Amino acid sequence: MEWLEPWESVEPVRTDDPSAFGRGWEAELRKEVVPGHVLHGLAVTLIARRYDRDDALFQMQDGRVAQVHLTWKQAPELDPRWPETVIYPSLQAWADTGQRRDHDEWLADNGQ
């Protein structure tokens, strides 16, 4: 997988390391989603993050990925539309559309 700026890969979380970077993001997602949210009750793993924003990419067990804009409220959101989430059928589908769009916007914003 080629990660385009501003996205970067996150090392897989070891199950024996409760302080691993990804665990914090996964825990925050669990805190924020409420019944009615598309990710409520689903097991996800952080695989990438956007280093200039609070966006994260989570892998679902069925192969789909979710690009999520975490609010870092550290509590359940009142509206199940938050955190804002876009589901892609695969990592490749996200790379071709979501990552490409973010990369093009990032280049434009940074004068490149």
Image (cartoon, rainbow, N blue to C red):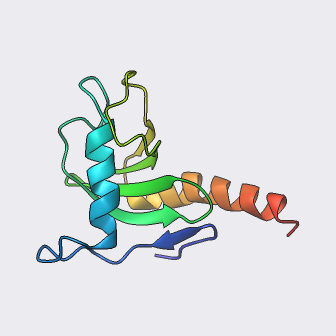
Check the image and name the residue furthest to the front: 74
In the figure, is residue 67 to the left or right of 19?
A: right
Residue name at image x 29 percent, y 55 percent: 26
Q: Is residue 80 above or below residue 42?
A: above
Q: Is residue 78 above or below residue 12?
A: above
Residue name at image x 45 percent, y 49 percent: 67
Q: Is residue 86 above or below residue 49?
A: above
In the figure, is residue 9 to the left or right of 108?
A: left
In the figure, is residue 94 to the left or right of 102?
A: left
Please identify the quarter of the rendering in which residue 30 is found.
top left
Q: Quadrant of the C terminus?
A: bottom right
In the figure, is residue 93 to the left or right of 42?
A: right
Compare residues 53 and 9 and report the one nearer the observer.
53
Q: Can I make out residue 56 in this image?
A: yes
Residue 45 at x, y percent in the picture: 27, 60
Residue 7 at x, y percent in the picture: 56, 67
